[in-house]
Image (cartoon, helix red, strand yellow):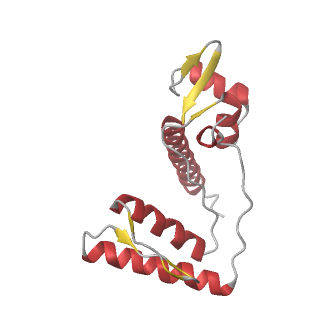
Amino acid sequence: MSSTQEPTRRSKRPELSPEELEMARVAHRCIAESLDRARAATIGLTSDEGEMPSVDLPPSALRLIGEVLGQLSERRAVTVVSAKLEMTTVEAASYLHVSRPFLIREIEAGRLPHRMVGSHRRVQFDDLHAYKLQMLAGQKDALRQIAENARDLGLEY
């Protein structure tokens, strides 16, 4: 299985030293500023042995690198997943923190797109993430409605 097809492979969150956190913070700021000021898409790398050649990167890649550095500088975990990644029903259920039977019911009800590979269902990550956002929005609405009902009944807490 190729590395792009391993969504469940976990790497340990990097423990950055204070110096590395500061480096990530500065790099994030520099990348953001350079993208705001110009359309330049090169980044210079240096090594202990001397100057290395510049590397040409598209602005979208620089934005992604800047975002990752910003998150790391705030000690947040980062996962980068290809939007075109397909997940098994077990992996998709794990991502949503639901049971596999619940996920299968959602697929069969037509609320979550999928495709069949032989007799196995595959769910595209983009569809799964959109479903998750929709599910979270529904939960927030339900909680808001419960709070309103409690307030109407004088059960504020």
Q: Is 97 left, or right, of 30 in this rendering? A: right
Q: Is 78 left, or right, of 42 in this rendering? A: right
| Image coordinates for residue 69, horizontal then vertical, percent | 53, 71
Task: Please report the residue visible at 48 percent of the width from the left and 65 percent of the height from the top.
Answer: 65
Query: Residue furthest toward the front?
Result: 49
| Image coordinates for residue 93, horizontal then vertical, percent | 68, 35
Q: Nearer the viewer, residue 157 or 120?
A: 120
Q: Is residue 122 above or below residue 14?
A: above
Q: Quadrant of residue 120?
A: top right
Task: Please report the residue visible at 56 percent of the width from the left and 53 percent of the height from the top.
Answer: 80
Q: In this view, does 25 lie above or below 132?
A: below
Task: Please report the residue visible at 40 percent of the width from the left and 65 percent of the height from the top.
Answer: 62
| Image coordinates for residue 48, horizontal then vertical, percent | 59, 84
Q: Quadrant of residue 94?
A: top right
Q: Which of 54 and 5 is in front in this view?
A: 54
Q: Is 154 left, or right, of 94 in this rendering? A: left
Q: Which of 69 and 137 is in front in this view?
A: 69
Quarter of the figure that contains the C terminus: bottom right
Total numbered labels placed on residues in the image? 0
Task: Please report the residue visible at 62 percent of the width from the left and 37 percent of the height from the top.
Answer: 5
Quarter of the figure that contains the N terminus: top right
Q: In this view, does 7 lie above or below 108?
A: below
Query: Residue furthest toward the left?
Result: 38
Q: Is residue 29 above or below residue 57?
A: below
Q: Nearer the viewer, residue 119 or 157?
A: 119
